[in-house]
Image (cartoon, rainbow, N blue to C red):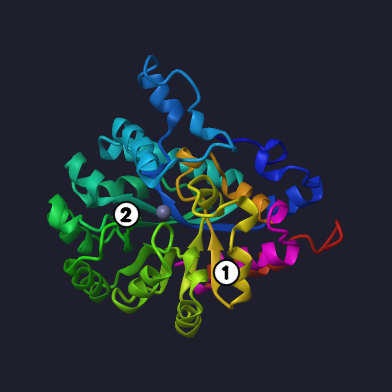
Amino acid sequence: MNTPLSKSPWARDMSPEMARFISDLPKTEHHLHIEGTTPYDRLQRLQPEAYRDAPEHWGSEFRFDSFDHFLHVLGSHGLAWFTSPERYALAAEDIFARALTQNVRYIELSFDANFAAAVGAGPCAIAQAIHSVVPDGLEVVVFMGMTRDAYVNGCAEVIDQALRSEFITGIDLHGTEPLPLLDWTKRIWEAARAEGKVTKAHAGEFGPASNVREAVEILGVQRVQHGVRAVEDQAVLDLLGARGVILDVCPISNVKLKVVPSPEAHPLRKLIDAGIACTISTDDPFAFNNTLEEEYAFVHTTLGFGRDELRGLARQGIRNALVSEQKRKAWLDELEGVGKTGASAS
Ligand SMILES: [Zn+2]
């Protein structure tokens, strides 16, 4: 982790000027799981025998065999680390420190209800622990995510508590798409909005475009995590466009999980060309060994996004950040100035 952009395999043949441009963009991260960001160096110090080597899944050519394979890697490391609110705070400290070095201004950080139930301290204590380590210069909002069977499988109390917690800004449905959408979900998503929470849902990653439709029409979300398979159904794209739904896309995650057949086949440009608002994020940096700067580098080097398009991605992120209008305007003003003096824009 923490590969400098100039040495990143995702930034091959990128000019130093472009690296500087990406670095200078004020950026936001809308799709980041704390349990997918296990602080491996801390885990190594804790259990040096068990975690001696760099994980094989960190290589840029590595691909997970399946979503279950990915969940096993994530879960086994995550469960070893995330055992108390204090451990959440330490992981969050590392995430925030790394964000500041990349000019990231805003993070929507989610933790998982199943982990919260296992920790046993309550979701409020976890969210509070995360908030307690937010540094100056970074805005952070906390979401609680949950699997499609969470409410009926041991997390009802945790979910009910989260809806009442002032430290939790919203809820998210996590990416176990092989499971159907169960009846409890619509009720909880409506209850969350009645409590003033923001609601999101993972859909259209391993599941089909119809799952994206379901998230929008049944759960009523304005924010879909991934949603890239919406590209397979023009009617779903039309629905997203008509309702102004935002997709928080994680390109390197989609590559390493083989959601797309090859890096070049990633549909981000098609989605944007279809008029869909997209942001880019890292998803699970422990699993994918990626940074937000590398996501920008990837869409430049592999998908051919130029400066204006990279700026457009950062602009969507700032527009959809849950911050004051004053802060948003300041970031947008700064964004428009990046690369406009000195090096010529291309
Ligand atoms: Zn995700």
Quadrant in which the C terminus appears? bottom right
User: Hey, which quadrant is residue 315 in on the image?
Assistant: bottom right
Amino acid, disc 1: Gln
Query: Which residue is painted at 20% across and 63% down in the image?
Result: 164
| Magenta range | 300-325
Precedes in sequence: disc 1 or disc 2: 2
Relative height, residue 169 to residue 48 (above, below) = below
Q: Which mark is nearer the camera, 1 or 2?
A: 2
Rendered residue at 38%/72% (across/down) = 210
The kind of residue tagged 2 is Thr
Magenta span: helix, strand or loop, mainly?
A: helix
- Measured as percent of width and height from the top left, residue 319 is found at 54, 71
CA–CA distance in space, label 1 to label 2? 27 Å
Q: In the image, residue 209 lies at what x, y percent?
A: 43, 69
In the rendering, which numbered label is found on residue 158? none
The quadrant of the rendered image in which ligand 1 is seen is bottom left
Q: Nearer the viewer, residue 210 or 196?
A: 210
Q: Identify the residue position indicated by label 1 in the image.
A: 316
Q: Is residue 132 visible?
A: no
Mark seen at residue 176: 2
Query: Which residue appears at 70% of the width and 44% of the height?
Result: 11
Compared with 286, 20 (above or below) is below
SS for callout 1: helix
Q: Secondary structure at mark 2?
A: loop
Q: Where does the image place residue 228, in percent across and percent down from the top left? A: 50, 64
Quadrant for the N terminus in the image: top right
Q: Nearer the viewer, residue 179 or 138?
A: 179
Q: 239 left or right of 185?
A: right
Q: Is residue 317 magenta?
A: yes
Q: Is residue 313 visible?
A: yes
Answer few, some or many: residues within 10 Å of disc 2's Cα (few below 14, many 20 plus, some between 14 and 19). Answer: many
